[in-house]
Amino acid sequence: MRTFKAFLLFFSIVFSNLLMAQTATIKGRVADRQSKQPVEYASVALLKSTDSVLISGTVSKANGTFQFDHVASGKYLLKVAFIGYHNQYSAVITVGSGLYNAGTILLSPGQQLLNEVNVSGQAAGSINKIDKQSYKAAQFELAKGGSAVDVLKNLPSVSVNGEGEIRLRGSAGFMVLINGKPVLTDAQTVLSQLPANAVDNIELITAPSAKYDPDGRGGIINIITKKGASDGFTLATNVQGGLPALNDFGNSRKPQRYGADLTLNYRKNKWDISVGGNYNRNDNAGYREGDVYTKNFANNTITRFPSAGERSFKKYNYAGRATINYAADASNTFSAGFFMGKRYQDRIADLLYHNTTSNLATNALIQSNTYYNSNQQTKQGDFSLANFDYTHTFQNKATLTAGMVYEHANLYGDTKNRNLKYPNTTDTIQYVYNPYKRPINGYRFKLDHSLPLGKGKLESGYQLRYDTQDGQFDYSVTPLTGQTDIAKFNGSLHAKNMINSFYTQYSGKASKLEYTGGLRYEYATRTVNISYDSKPHQLDLSNLFPSANLLYSFTEAWKLKAGYSKRINRTTNLELNPIPEREHSETLEQGDPDLLPEFIDLAELGTIHNFKQGSFFATLYYQHIKNPIQRLNSVYADTILNRVYSNAGNARLFGLEAGTNLQPAKWCTLYMGANLYNYKINGNINILGTPTTVNNSNWAYSVNANSSFMLNKTLSLGANVNYLSKRPTAQGEDSQFFVPGTSLKKTLMNGRLAASLLWQNMNIFNANKQRITTQGPNFYTTTNYIYETNVFMINLAFNLNKFTGKLKLPSSELNDKEF
């Protein structure tokens, strides 16, 4: 009831501020002064004639036309800009009501048009704004045929390790948006289902304002997908395929790689309809080498169990999606979206173990055993969702938007763990079967209002988020020998999250200064019920999340920006689940139903420099993390480690990120980004009743570089490098990870058809390997993950008409966070 009353109060405040005004429509056309041909995608700005304050903006269509609706009575100027042309201003326009035709505005080409187009094209590949960085996906040729992760890993403050874990500014916790809509999912999983060919550009929102959800330690990643550029039909399709890697380690199964994606867009009059579908099979072969020991001080023994063997993945996903956008009139627009898809992954780890138990003091051998462990972990899910949005634009340019999303995800899987005699692997020592089901239902309702106020804009909104998950976890052991606690591995869990939030913020510009300031309030409740515990695990949170951003332009070439944002990194249901899962022979993994979310203070200070050959930026940033969530190890039994999610005291992170786009010659472009940071974590914590001290600090860095060389007008050669240094964790460190690649691209049919040969994971400088090491007073474990190298892929892309801008396909609210 209190939520409903607050909603009514908000609604009444919104409408009390709406003003009615006499309005007009301004139409016009943009053309080349010499050829008189229309200029498409020219930027057209509507300015007040008295002080040149920006009122609105648009871009010209394929026929060069543009239009501004609901323009209040007054005097205005039109400013038209397009790369390679001089800016052009119209005469002063006086409008009252009705239709005003501004006629044709002619643009004059610059003296070095072609050169300027090339330079500007590179600059547009990397743009810095007051609260974010924006990157064009098309500049990363090696990502073609892959997923959005393959695009994302090239950005300066982003790193992706061997396991596919994505980090933004050194933090694994961040929020994902697709076309500006929140996706409460694990980034690796949701982005791996989005084809790279469908991505137009990626925004890194490093100091988010109050209108965004405060989720995510490192900030927000917004994926913007492609959309048809002109009226009529627009078609884009891609087909890719590849051979098994040249280095396959002699594994039992060979990886398969092939797929296709298609996007069809139709725009006409009031309708904008998009449909799309994709299928992707992208297996990964690999090898694993592990070395582990545990110390049993009570028995005065040390147990070692090194292992080695195949570790490979079979992965595929497919999906169909559609959106319908309808502009009933200039004031009312409706949109609806639908999505249905499936994702499947199974991982096999067939390892040979050599177990020994020795005297801890003398190292004298007590016993030894060799066995073969065959482990298969399967994860899959069927996903469906629907969303509906309505936007009303008032005569004073105020807008009111209401939106809702419903999602259902049916997640299920199992782990089959077989310990077999060796060398006669037909004899089973023990078989462990660990199936689960985790259906999820999620809802979101949003109401946002925007009102022009003074020289800026006032935005306010309310949001309700609600999701539930029912989990059933089973466990069986055959034979039952030696395990007396089997009951703790069976059970059910029900988790419920509800978040009510209100926000308000004001943004504007005064001379050379742009600014945004806001405040968000959230009341969140979380309830976890477990079958073997009669007492619910309840958490209620009431928090304020302030934010502020400044951007000052000293000149056109030099800018300075600063930002602050209060963030929260919420717990996932996997992290909350205390029912252990036997991940493989030597580990158990479980969560904590009383786990606290992380709270983060995020601040940054940076500079932006634009010059003739490109652009450069550098940003200092700082994060203070309260209740950092870590997956920590402890000893469960002599040959089994327990991996438990826990709040590990406090942590802080500070660093420097930098990036540049250069065009040293007409035929050569270079993009490079780097991130250097120092991470420190410390605290005295309790892991399943065992006191543990965590204290670790070190430097880490990543470098991503991408270059392109035009061999002729239709043939280009590309190369890229992704390097991640060794970096500290709560109980150890992860080694470096290095992935180089090259590509060769040929365009045909005036650019409509493109064929690319991709050489991925080149086998140079110990590439595509990563070692993960953790240790404590009574254990040590190190695992070297060796991934296949020298993978060759072919990608064919065909485009009928152009694609650009946002394709508002529906985005998942929960989908794969628990995948």
Image (cartoon, helix red, strand yellow):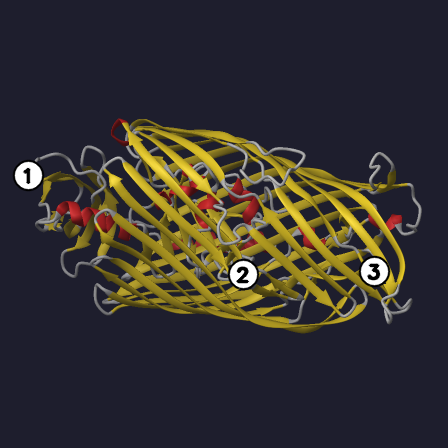
**Is any atom of residue 161 visible in this view?**
yes
Q: Are marks 3 and 1 in contact (CB under 8 Å)?
A: no
Question: Which amino acid, mark 2?
Answer: Ser
Circle 2: element type: loop
Name the residue at 54% across, 59% down.
736
Q: Which of the two discs, 2 and 3, sits closer to the camera?
A: 3
Q: Earlier in the sequence, mark 2 or mark 3?
A: 2
Tell me residue 751's x, y (percent): 28, 32
Which class describes the residues within 10 Å of circle 1: few (<14), some (14-19), or many (20+)?
A: few
Q: Are marks 1 and 2 in contact (CB under 8 Å)?
A: no
Q: Which residue is mark 3?
A: 303
Taking depth in this image into account, of 135 and 748 the one nearest to the observer is 748
CA separation in Å, label 2 and label 3: 34 Å
Question: Which amino acid, mark 1?
Answer: Gln
Q: Earlier in the sequence, mark 1 or mark 2?
A: 1
Name the residue at 26% across, 49% down.
668
CA separation in Å, label 3 and label 1: 82 Å
> Residue 509, located in which quarter of the rendered image?
bottom left
Which class describes the residues within 10 Å of circle 3: few (<14), some (14-19), or many (20+)?
A: many
Q: Which residue is mark 2?
A: 171
**Is any atom of residue 103 visible in this view?**
no
**Horizontal relation, residue 55 to residue 699: left or right:** left
Numbered tag placed on residue 34 in the rendering: 1
Circle 1: element type: loop
Tell me residue 43's x, y (percent): 22, 46
Tell me residue 520's x, y (percent): 49, 62
Q: Earlier in the sequence, mark 3 or mark 1?
A: 1
